[in-house]
Image (cartoon, rainbow, N blue to C red):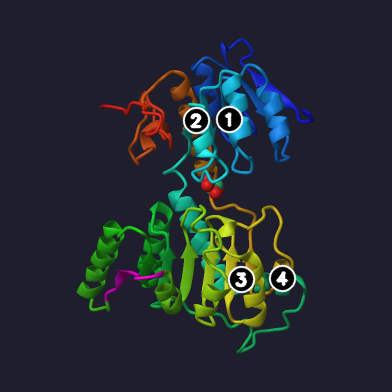
């Protein structure tokens, strides 16, 4: 049943594209309209379920831009393919809500929006780190509750992170940007856990260390951990930046939480199910000087029972990428993904997405995650 209001733009466009949420900015809409699309945008803020999306796809739909909150699995890709669909883009860099196998089976390319969330999400992770370490939210509540009766030597003592050790789980783009902000800004040594060595991160920390040394200060270290356990034991701050898949679900569980320092800070701005949230509640309850800062939750939008009552946990509503610039840029990339696929353009295949934000965007789809199995052509300069 279709209960939401859908707004139609360019009603006579020969190709029909559905967009399951209103997106920030205007450029994305222009891109789709210039590509000849009639664009139908859902104006409701409710999370759309399979039934409603399938009904909107109907018997004629060329493409769609969907949200990370929607289950783009076999049923929706089958419906989209049956309706003549040839393009889908997630409005997100992460695509754990998308069944890639199903999309590929129906020969539907799946786009995502990498590159434009990196610094924005890393900045939020930095904000969460300090909010937790320095008890910002507790202090805010205390002030608003009218309980501040004057400076005290031991009011809200937190943790100094300067020159401590930072643990990065998943040293991809966002993990690397966050590590550099924390290493360069707060002179933290870095230990990272990743299936691949990240030489770029190692070199950048080392060269920043040389700069410090040249000024007579102690350099920094950056090393790849032998195991996640090794990192958890050593780090004062552990920040999660890995993808969510079957292997990383509950990566941080009761046993691994117990390995962490008693006063460590755990930050998650990636995906909620990386942490066993019930185990985290129990751990934070038992260890009042342990702190957690979460942008994402195991069962969004819900929180595990007891999480919201814990003073040593900071929670924000999945706003890692929520800056105007990033959200508008994500919309532009998602629109170029769909427009490019519908026009049969090649796939950009490079990590720098800025050309798509400039005045002469490449004639390509910025990022198609199943380009390889679909044997889509790559962009040639
Ligand atoms: C993404 O793009 O995957 C983010 O989680 C959205 O903020």
Disc with the residue nearer the chain's start (4 vs 3) = 3
The residue under label 3 is 136
Mark 4, residues whose alpha carbon is within 10 Å: few (<14), some, or many (≥20)? few
How far apart in space, not on screen, are marks 4 and 3 (Cα)?
A: 9 Å
Q: Are marks 1 and 4 in contact (CB under 8 Å)?
A: no
- Residues at marks 3 and 2, CA–CA distance in whole angstroms: 49 Å
Mark number, residue 105:
2
Q: Of marks 1 and 4, which one's residue comes earlier in the chain?
A: 1
State the residue at coordinates (47%, 47%): 117
Pointer 1 residue Cβ closer than 8 Å to ligand 1: no
* Disc nearest the viewer among 3 and 1: 1
- Magenta span: chief secondary structure: loop
Q: Is residue 258 left or right of residue 60?
A: left
Is residue 293 located in the magenta-colored stretch of the structure?
Answer: no
Magenta-highlighted residues:
219-227
Marks 3/1: CA distance? 44 Å
Q: Which mark is residue 77?
A: 1
Q: Cβ–Cβ below 8 Å for labels 1 and 2?
A: yes
Q: Which mark is residue 378?
A: none
Q: Write the residue at 60% across / 74% down.
A: 135
Q: Position of residue 182 (x, y in %)?
A: 41, 66
Disc 2 is placed on an element classified as helix
Kind of element beneath mark 1: helix
For label 2, being within 8 Å of ligand 1 is answered no
The label number, if any, that marks residue 141 in the structure image = 4
């Amino acid at each position: 049943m279709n209960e939401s209001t859908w707004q139609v733009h360019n009603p006579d466009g020969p190709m029909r594209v559905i967009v399951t949420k209103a997106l920030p900015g205007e450029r994305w809409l222009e891109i789709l309209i210039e590509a000849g699309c009639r664009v139908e945008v859902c104006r409701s803020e409710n999370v759309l379920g399979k039934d409603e999306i399938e009904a909107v796809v109907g018997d004629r739909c060329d493409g769609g831009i969907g949200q990370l909150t929607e289950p783009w699995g076999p049923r929706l890709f089958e419906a989209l393919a049956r309706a003549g669909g040839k393009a889908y883009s997630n409005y997100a860099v992460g695509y754990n809500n998308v069944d890639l196998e199903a999309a590929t089976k129906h020969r539907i390319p799946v786009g995502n929006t990498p590159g434009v969330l990196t610094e924005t999400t890393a900045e939020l992770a930095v904000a969460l780190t300090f909010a937790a370490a320095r008890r910002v939210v507790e202090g805010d509540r205390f002030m608003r509750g009218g309980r501040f009766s004057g400076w005290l030597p031991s009011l809200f003592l937190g943790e100094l992170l300067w020159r401590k050790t930072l643990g990065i789980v998943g040293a991809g783009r966002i993990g690397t940007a966050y590590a550099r902000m924390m290493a360069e800004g707060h002179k933290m040594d870095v230990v990272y856990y990743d299936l691949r060595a990240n030489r770029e991160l190692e070199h950048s920390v080392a060269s920043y260390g040389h700069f410090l040394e040249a000024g007579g200060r102690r350099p920094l270290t950056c090393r790849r951990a032998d195991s996640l356990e090794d990192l958890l034991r050593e780090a004062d701050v552990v920040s999660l930046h890995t993808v969510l898949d079957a292997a990383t679900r509950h990566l941080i569980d009761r046993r691994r939480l117990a390995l962490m320092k008693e006063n460590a800070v755990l930050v998650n701005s990636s995906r909620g199910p990386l942490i066993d949230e019930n185990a985290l509640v129990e751990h934070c309850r038992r260890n009042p000087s342990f702190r957690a800062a979460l942008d994402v939750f195991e069962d969004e939008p819900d929180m595990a029972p007891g999480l919201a009552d814990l003073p040593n946990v900071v929670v924000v509503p999945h706003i890692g990428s929520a800056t105007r610039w990033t959200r508008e840029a994500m919309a532009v990339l998602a629109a170029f993904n769909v427009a490019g696929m519908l026009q049969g353009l090649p796939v950009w295949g490079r990590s720098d997405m800025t050309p798509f934000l400039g005045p002469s965007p490449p004639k390509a789809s910025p990022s198609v995650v199943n380009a390889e199995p679909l044997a889509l052509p790559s962009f040639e300069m």
